[in-house]
Amino acid sequence: MRLAEPLFLSTGNVIIDTPYPYMNLDLSKQKLKNAGSEREVPIHPDLIEFGFIDFVKVRQKAGLSGRLFHRITSKGDVSNYYSKYLGRYIDRIGLTDPRLVAHSFRHGFKDALRNANIPEGEQYRIMGQSPKDVGQTYGVGSDINVLWEHAAKTDLLLTDEVKELLKGKK
């Protein structure tokens, strides 16, 4: 997802009562780059393992229908603020290559999709990118179960240390 997409996601747009949980990105309900950004984004099994679904359940059970990450705020554009915040964090942990920015995660995920041999059309759909071929615009696209299975094949390249941190064990 683009940095702004999860920041503006509402609690009602995270669909968890299905075998294939996903985030429904809807231009009429949140800020998106363009109409092509509307899509269903499968929730990767690692995020489920790290407790994302539990977090969503708590927010939904509390009847909170606003933004999922409601505590994320800034005085200006929230996505710009967190892009800079993440950039400073990347520098602070010693990754000082100026090419490493918040958007680098998106590039890394694209590589993970390629390395998992995910068909290019599904890559575009998962990432909300414009297809390069008119034939890929035909129909409504793959069902969420297909996209979820593809996303589940991707290796997010998380180290054991990062996995433990995300699970709250460190």
Image: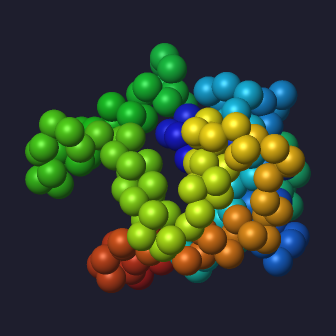
Tell me residue 125's x, y (percent): 67, 50
Q: What scheme was used to colour the molecule?
A: rainbow
- The residue sitting at 33% across, 82% down in the picture is 160
Q: Is residue 115 visible?
A: yes
Left or right position of 150 against 162: right
Q: Quadrant of residue 50 in the image?
A: bottom right
Tell me residue 11's x, y (percent): 78, 49
> Foreground residue, 60 or 111?
111
Tell me residue 166's x, y (percent): 44, 71
- The residue sitting at 15% across, 51% down in the picture is 95
Q: Is residue 5 visible?
A: no
> Foreground residue, 138 or 165?
138
> Foreground residue, 5 or 168?
5
Q: Is residue 116 above or below residue 79?
A: below
User: Which image quarter is the C terminus in?
Assistant: bottom left
Labels in figure, total? 0
- The residue sitting at 82% across, 77% down in the picture is 19
- The residue sitting at 40% across, 77% down in the picture is 163
